[in-house]
Image (cartoon, rainbow, N blue to C red):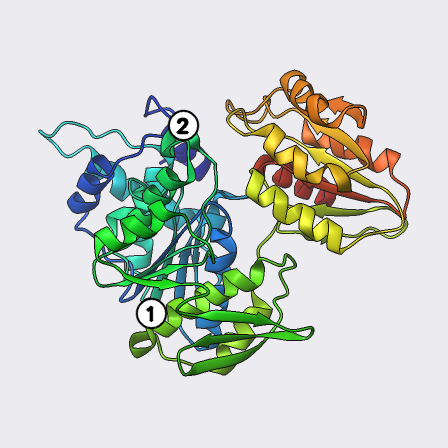
Amino acid sequence: MRSLAEWLDYQQRIHPRSIELGLARVGEVWRRMGAPVPAPVVITVGGTNGKGSTVAFLEAMLAADGKRVGCYTSPHLLRYNERVRVAGVDVDDALLIEAFERIEAAREVATVDEIPLTYFEFGTLAALWIFSRAGLDAALLEVGLGGRLDAVNIIDADAAVVTTVDLDHQDWLGNDRDSIGREKAGIFRVGRPAIIGMREPMQGLLEETTRLGADMVRAGHDYTVIVRDAGWQWHSGASGLELPLPTLAAACQVDNAAAAITAIFKLRDRLGWSPGALGVGVRKARVPARLQLLATPGAADVIVDVAHNPQAARELARWLGDNPIAGRTFAVFGALDDKDVGGIVTPLLPYIDSWILAGLAGLTSRGLPVAPLQAHVRAAASPSVAAACDDPRTALARACALASPQDRVVAFGSFYVAAEVLEAMKAGD
C-alpha cells in the first residue's frame, strides 16, 4: 500500500514528460474504468486567468442554493487534497489513494499495453471517479492547460466558460492570442452554452466557437454588467439581478462572478434559479492567494497573489494603483522558466518601490534560478532590485526586514511563491 505522498512521487516518475497534452491515453483509461460520469450537470471552466475564482463563485452560489457540488481545480497551494473537493471539503488521503489504485488497475489491464499517464492525468481521473460516487448535483472542472487537449476535456460539459485569453504557455498553445483562443474554445460543445467572459474576445476564439456549433453567450452582448459604488447589476435579456460586490478583491472578480451567474442562468432548468443564493455566493466565494491579505500587528502587511503572466500582472497593477499606501511597496517575485518575466514586471514598475527576487530552482525543475531571474528583472527594473535570494522564504524574510509597518510586501509570480509565503507566514517565520 502506497501513501498519498508515495503515489504522487510515483506519478511524477512513470511518464517521461511532466506535460503531454492529448485525450487518447487518458480517455482510454477513463473508458476502462467504466467511463464514470462525475455528476448529472457538469460545468467546465477554462481560460488564461480567472478559472479558479470562477469555479469558486459557481461553487458558492450552488452551495447556497442547497446543491451538493464537487470541484476539481489545480494546481494546489499547500496540500494535494485541495484539488478535489466535495461539498466544500477537501477529500482525504484514503479516498485519493483508492482512486489512484483504480486508475492503476485500469492502466495496467492484463494483455494490454500499459498506458503512461502524467501526474495531472492521474489527478483528473481520480477526481472524476470520486465525483461519480459522491452523489453530486453538479461537478465543476477547471481546465489545467489550454482546453482542447487538456485531460478535463474527455468530459462533455453541459456548459463551459472561457474567462480570459492572453499569452501564456506558448510552447503548448501557440504564439498568438488567436491560436490560444482556438485551443481554449475546444472545451465548448455543439448546442451547449459557451460562455465567453471577455468583453473583447479575439477572433480566433469566436471563429472556433462558431465552427463547433456551440451556443455562444458573450459578455457585453448576451449579458451585461454595470458596477456601482456599493454593488453591481447583471442583466441578460429581460432577466436582471442586483448583487453585492465580491469579497474577492480584484476588479476583474465582478466579471468572473458574472460569467458564473450566466452559466447557471443557461442551465437554470436543471440547476434552478435562486437570485438570493447567487448574491450569497458572490460574497462567500473565497480563493487563497488571490490578493490575500496577511496582516501582522506592528509589521508591514503581506499580500499574496498568484499572478504569473502579463495579464494577471496588469490586474495586480490595477489593484495596487487603486489601493495606494503612504509607505513603500516591496515585491517578492519568482517565476517559472517559461514565463515572460519582462511582460510580468513592466506593468508593475510604477507601483513597486523595491524588488526582492526569489529563485525557484530548488522547488521545481521548471523554476527559474535567481541569476537569470535577476538578469531579466534588472533589464526592466534596475536599480530598484534590492536583493536576490535563492528561495521565496528567504526573499520574504529579507523584504519584511526592509519594510516598515507603514509599508507593504506583495508576493507573486508563481503558485510556488504563494505557497512558500503562505507556509512561512503560518509558521511565523
Q: Say if residue 389 shows up in the picture.
A: yes
Residue flagged by tag 2: what amino acid is it?
Asp
Residue flagged by tag 1: what amino acid is it?
Asp
394 or 226, which is in the foreground?
226
Q: Earlier in the sequence, mark 2 or mark 1?
A: 1
Q: Quadrant of the N terminus?
A: top left
339 sits left or right of 139 in the view: right
142 sits left or right of 405 in the view: left
Estimate how packed mark 1 is, as few (under 14), some (14 to 19) or many (20 or more) residues with alpha carbons within 10 Å. many
Q: Residue at x 39, y 69 (%)?
A: 222
Q: Quadrant of the C terminus?
A: top right
Q: Residue at x 38, y 47 (%)?
A: 96
Q: CA distance from mark 2 to mark 1?
A: 37 Å
Q: How many marks?
A: 2
Q: Say if residue 335 shows up in the picture.
A: no
187 or 299, which is in the foreground?
187
> Residue under circle 2?
171
Estimate how packed mark 2 is, as few (under 14), some (14 to 19) or many (20 or more) residues with alpha carbons within 10 Å. few
Residue 386: percent from left, percent from top: 81, 26
